[in-house]
Amino acid sequence: MNAEDLLSALSHLDELFGQHGIEYWLFGGWAVDFHAGKVTRPHDDLDLAVLSHDGQRVRELLIASGWRHAPEEGYSVYERDGVRLEVAFLDHGEWPQNSFERDVAEVAGVRARVVSLSSLRADKAMVRDDESVAAKDRADSVTLGRLPGQRSFPTSGSLMRLDAQSSAAVTAARRGHERTTSPRSRRGRRSWPLRRPRKAVC
C-alpha cells in the first residue's frame, strides 16, 4: 500500500469523524511519521484509537462510507479500496502513560490527532520477539530520536477540543492503564494497545 492512498484515507477519516464529533487518535508507525512531519518508511495500514462510547457510531459511519467490516479475533478491521484500518478503544486495554493528549500533526497537507511522543517512545523502546516487527521499531526509534521535542499545530476544523465526557474518559484511561508491558503481536506484527482491548462493539 502506497503512502498516498493511506494519507488520502486518513484525510477522509479525519473529515468524517470531525463532521460527527468523534474524537480519534492515530497511533503506531504512522503516528511516528506525523510527529516527524514526513513519511520515513512504508506502512501497511492505519491504526486509530477512539472512545468506546463512540464505537457503534464509528462502525455505522465507516460502513455507510464504503468501508467493509472484516472482524478478526480480538480487534476490529475495516477495508476500503485496498486500505486496511484497525480501530482500538483507548479506554480498554493498557496504553503507555499520557498517550492521549492534544497533539496534532501534519504530513503532506493531511492533519491528524496523534498519540503523544512520550507514548510512542515508550512503545518503540520495547523488545519484540518478531524480527520484522523489531526492524520497524528500530527504524521508528531512529526517527523519534531525531525529534527535538513535541511537534504540534493549532487545532482546527475536525480536530475538536475534548468535551467533558471525552475528557473524563481519557482521564480514567490514563489512571487505569499506566503500567507498561510487552504488547501482543498478531501474525508477526506489533500492535497497540499493550493489552488486548475489547472491540466487539466496533
Image (cartoon, rainbow, N blue to C red):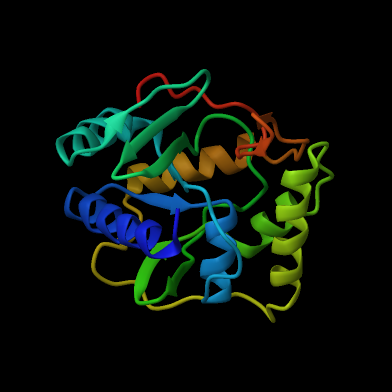
Q: Residue at x 68, y 78 (%)?
A: 147
Question: Looking at this view, is 131 or 107 the one in front?
Answer: 131
Q: Residue at x 75, y 40 (%)?
A: 180
Q: Residue at x 50, y 34 (%)?
A: 91
Does 120 sit above or below residue 150? above
Q: In which quarter of the image is the C terminus?
A: top left
Question: Looking at this view, is 28 or 68 the one in front?
Answer: 68
Question: Looking at this view, is 26 or 94 the one in front?
Answer: 26
Does 186 sit above or below residue 21? above
Outermost residue toward the bottom? 148
Does 97 sit above or below residue 151? above
Does 127 sit above or below residue 34? above
Describe residue 122's horizontal placement relative to residue 37 as left or right. right
Where residue 185 sits, quadrant-wise, is top right
Find residue 48 and report its horizontal and vertical position in percent.
44, 46
Find residue 63 and report its horizontal and vertical position in percent.
21, 33
Describe residue 80's horizontal placement relative to residue 122 as left or right. left
Describe residue 76's horizontal placement relative to residue 69 as left or right. right
